[in-house]
Image: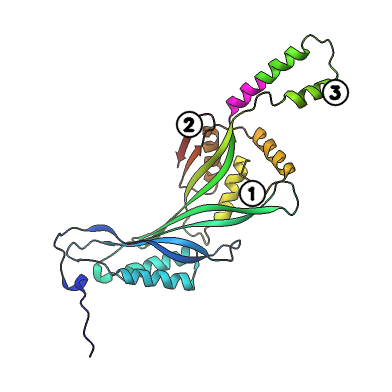
Amino acid sequence: MSIPLPDVALTELSATRAPLDWVGMDGIDVPILLDEPEFAYPVHARAEVQVDLPDPAIKGIHMSRLYRLLDGFAGRDRLNPASLAVLLREMVFSHADCNSTRARLTLAFSLLCRRPALLTQGLSGWKSYPVRLEAVWKAGRLSLDATLQIGYSSTCPCSAALTRQLIEQAFVERFGAAGQVEPAAVAAWLQRNATLATPHSQRSVADVRVRIPEGATRLGLLALIERIETCLGTPVQTAVKRADEQAFARLNGQNLMYVEDAARKIRQAVAEGFSQFSVSVRHVESLHPHDAVASSSS
């Protein structure tokens, strides 16, 4: 004999009457297949799913409905703006009996990309780029934000100038009294003394948030990553040999930057493709026990 199971979310009223902005679940593990040509494999994502609960009398939402919709999406669809819009709309419809009008989905995952060495042919390694997507369905429209984290190297312009001055002074002390200097003698001196002082540099990180334009068919995450790495000029490397390390040192010397320089470079690059964005950069200083930071937004 089948006995009906109680559902207090439907049969009981809330003792405290107040609307709730968002109700749902956090930390759901789910495989996501991106609709991006560079990523044919699924990524492991942590998901947050919520709907609003505007009716103060309704005790609770139906969380299993949200979970099943997300699970079905993960096993069936590729992730792009259109498929996200369908999923979020279904989440709202699934809670019509709760008078919900809004839905939100957040996905956190990492893009694992194969990156070639700067010079050595056939040498490459894996680099991970953390990504956070936040999709909101409200008033029949989708808003979709993507936040990327990108690592790079930064060498301080002030430190580089001070270093050059020390080397210049040492050079004048050694050769200043000589009427003429043989190139071979200068080369030998530089071989021994060019690192008399070195500028400080450090691993740095940029967090870039963009609003995906309405009508976009794909997220374009890798293209955005490459645009940012290109504008900075010093992306961190994976597998290297000595020739690649030397090439990386050259890139750092050619792209000296304060934290302000990095933020402005990224802002200019991102503004070419997105009307709504924010940029936050952090240089994990090797000179100081604290970090240097800068931010900019549209």
- For mark 3, give the secondary structure: helix
Residue assigned mark 3: 184
Q: How many angstroms separate mark 3 from mark 2 (CA)? A: 42 Å
Q: Depth check: 110 or 294 in front?
A: 110
Q: Which of marks 1 and 2 precedes in the sequence?
A: 1
User: Quick check: can you spot residue 220?
Assistant: no
Q: On the picture, is 119 further left or further right than 232? A: right
Within 10 Å of the Cα at label 2, are there few (<14), some (14-19), or many (20+) other Cα atoms? few
**In the image, residue 103 lies in the stretch drawn in magenta:** no
Amino acid under disc 2:
Pro
Position in image of residue 207 (x %, y %)? 49, 45
Q: How many angstroms separate mark 3 from mark 1 (CA)? A: 36 Å
Q: On the picture, is 53 further left or further right than 274? A: left
Q: How many marks?
A: 3
Colouring of the image = rainbow
Which quadrant holds residue 184? top right
Q: Which of marks 2 and 3 precedes in the sequence?
A: 3
Q: Depth check: 211 or 187 in front?
A: 187
Tell me which segment is drawn in magenta.
156-165
Amino acid under disc 3:
Ala
Position in image of residue 223 (x %, y %)? 59, 53
Residue assigned mark 1: 238
x 70%, y 18%: residue: 168
User: Quick check: can you spot residue 233?
Assistant: yes
